[in-house]
Image (cartoon, rainbow, N blue to C red):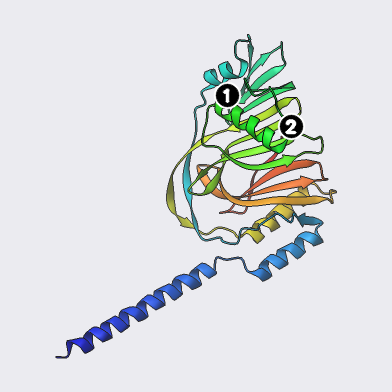
Amino acid sequence: MNTDKIKNIVIAALSALTILFVALIYFEEQSYVLSASQQEHIISILEHNDFSLASSVTMPRYFSPMRQLNMQWLNHDIEGIVARFFGDIVYEQDNEIGSTFYYCDINEKEIGINLASNIVNFSSLFGFFVAGHGEGFAHTTAGSKELAYAFIHEVIGVNDMEHYSTMLTSTGDYILVFYARHEGYIVFNSHVRVRVASYGIVHVVYSNMTAGEFIDYERPIFSADEALLALVSHLRAEHEYRQNILITDIQLIYAHQEGGVPAYLFTVLIDGSITFNYLFNAFTNMHIWSEIVL
């Protein structure tokens, strides 16, 4: 028996199967890629509705099926945070339904904790500095970033937050956004947003969650153009008479909703002055959260 001939036939058959599998994988992946014509079409719809995309925006092109993420609220070290924030200054505590407030009359510093959403707010009318970082402070992008990082590390006490963006407001303040990531994805509910004025930090919003394993099976998600259509519909109902709506960022992330779900995060500037975050569940294309960015 000519075994070499049989081997060659087997090798040829395996090679053909490999090429077939690669081709199938390629065509399957391409079915989850936003085409150029789809992008042009959604941009045309946005313009027709008086929406515009900032030149810096990169629209997410890939929308392969995704899984849920096991996310749990982190138990904040409130006592430690309060002690580090106020230092040796005596503070008072005021409890309300669903919230806890700590404040100091001497320097108008305040911590507000929303127990339902696990969000911690820090604020001061006169601004504040982290110990040792006020001397020589320069109200620049770099100086504000250094001050924000010092606050995150020394007061909040976390080290997994990565700088994501810096925005200069119409009043001359800097808003710096930091996120934790999991497997490359932004975890929206693990974030710190810091507003820095020329006289120090005036407002901080902090939230944190633990991100564990991916769970359940892969499910189809909506594409970015479909999510944009949902955003247009939502904003047209919410801001019926607004005509100057600029989308400054689009990200496919994970957000907390009965665990962790893939979601589209839209950052939107309205009337050139007010910045909002809008979240849409990528599984359902439904609005799940909106907020003013500081």
Q: Nearer the viewer, mark 2 or mark 1?
A: 2
Identity of the residue drawn at 31% across and 82% down: 13
On screen, residue 150 above or below 47: above
Nearest the viewer among 56 and 217 is: 56
Q: Image quadrant for the C terminus?
A: top right
Residue furthest front as drawn: 136
Q: Please give the residue where the numbered disc 1 appears in the rendered image.
A: 155
Which mark, by number, is residue 249? none
Q: Secondary structure at mark 2?
A: loop
Q: Residues within 10 Å of mark 1 (few under 14, many from 20)?
A: some
* Image position, residue 229 (x, y; %): 70, 58
Q: Which mark is residue 139?
A: 2
Among all residues in the image, which is located at the extreme bottom? 1
Visible residue check, residue 119: no
For residue 31, above or below residue 220: below
Question: Residue at 73% of width from left, 51% of height from top?
Answer: 247
Residue 172 percent location from the top left of the image:
79, 35
Q: Give the distance between the C-alpha atoms of the residues marked 2 and 1, in whole angstroms.
A: 20 Å
Q: Look at the image and tell me whether residue 159 can be seen.
A: yes
Tell me the quadrant of the picture where the N terminus can be found: bottom left
- The location of residue 275, given as percent across then percent down, is 75, 42
Q: Specify whether 15 is left or right of 240.
A: left
Identify the residue at horizontal 67%, vertical 49% (top origin): 266
Q: Look at label 1 and name its amino acid.
A: Val
Query: x, y (%) of residue 118?
Result: 57, 30
| SS at circle 1 | helix
Q: Earlier in the sequence, mark 2 or mark 1?
A: 2
The amino acid beneath tag 2 is His
